[in-house]
Image (spheres, grey):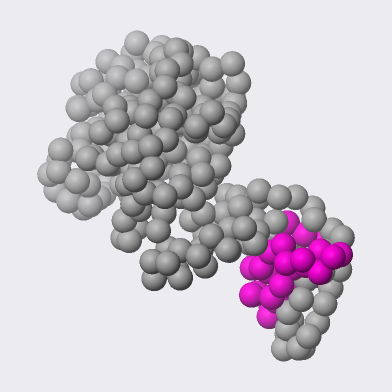
Amino acid sequence: MIFAIGEPFGLGGTATMGIVSATGRGGLGIENYEDFIQTDAAINPGNSGGAMIDLHGDLIGINTAILSGSNGGGNQGIGFAIPINMARSVMDQIVSHGKVVRGYLGLFPQDVTPALAKQFGLSGPGGALISGLKSDAPAARAGLKNGDVILKVNGQPVESANQLRLRISQTAPGTSVKLEISREGKTQDVNVTLGELPTDKSAEEAPGEKETGGLEGVEVQELTPDVAQELQLTPGTHGVVVSSVEPSSAAAAAGLSRGDLIQEVNHKPVHSITEYKQALAAAGEHPVLLLVNEGGVTQYVVIESR
């Protein structure tokens, strides 16, 4: 049992009681680094920043957010708190450095779905798939590549992209970490010295080429300098631009949309519509694995044939 203390709706000194429904909640879109405690104790507007304590009176979390749906912002039995060890770490860093200092790999991880696991020769979901790398960042300098799947950090299994982000962010810059990765179906170890997370966070309709098979309903166009500037792509970026996607297509269901940049098809880099069509022709009617750049962030997408 736990107690949530705060001032909901301006009512000072209010305590509510409940259970811990889950720990390690992430992917909520509230913060970049999420490791929330979920509770059914009534948490409402005004509870944020209040204490979450256990039956012994020990502080275990800081009330932070609620899942309110459409009921005007009130409690629905799903509230979230920052674990106290995470809050303590942030506090210690601010006291010591005057700011929060986080470890940094310089890559874009994504969860490994069953479809992606099959495409990358894995036995099942789990791990964090590298779908993009920052140039001259620690991960790239250590030799990591797009398509590598990070399975362990210092011998501890990695279950998701969120778990990888948390572990790296809570490791001091300058620390050497050992990553176990899967590359082309084979595992290997890579040592990476972490950097410090930077403080900055990191098309007009035109006639295109229609595709069939796994990408039926998708039209693409060449990446011209004007389009690259409009999409705010960095110099040297390659690929073909999605100019339209039929709403009922498998590509739309997988999240592909107008303005996305397709950079790889089944691990083959594409620099032109000709290379794109050749890669699709080789895929035939089988599922297609794309590396897609959306707003500067890359991720792998599997599009099933219908």
Residue 98 lies in the magenta-colored region: no
- Examine the rendering and report whether any part of residue 164 can be seen: yes
Q: Position of residue 215 (x, y in %)?
A: 42, 26
What residue is at 86 percent from the left and 64 percent from the top? 55
What residue is at 22 percent from the left and 40 percent from the top? 136
- Examine the rendering and report whether any part of residue 291 can be seen: no
What residue is at 81 percent from the left and 69 percent from the top? 57
Span highlighted in magenta in the image = 38-64
Where is 246 relative to 89, above or below? Answer: above
Q: Which residue is farthest left?
A: 225
Q: Which residue is farthest front?
A: 96
- Out of 278 and 110, give the one closest to the viewer: 110
Indicate the quadrant where residue 292 lies: top left
Quadrant holding the C terminus: top right
Where is 199 relative to 16, above or below? Answer: above
Where is 138 relative to 65, above or below? Answer: above
Q: Position of residue 188 (x, y in %)?
A: 42, 18
Where is 208 relative to 120, above or below? Answer: below
Q: Position of residue 164 (x, y in %)?
A: 50, 40
Q: Position of residue 41 (x, y in %)?
A: 82, 66
Residue 41 lies in the magenta-colored region: yes
What residue is at 42 percent from the left and 22 percent from the top? 189
Indicate the quadrant where residue 207 lies: top left
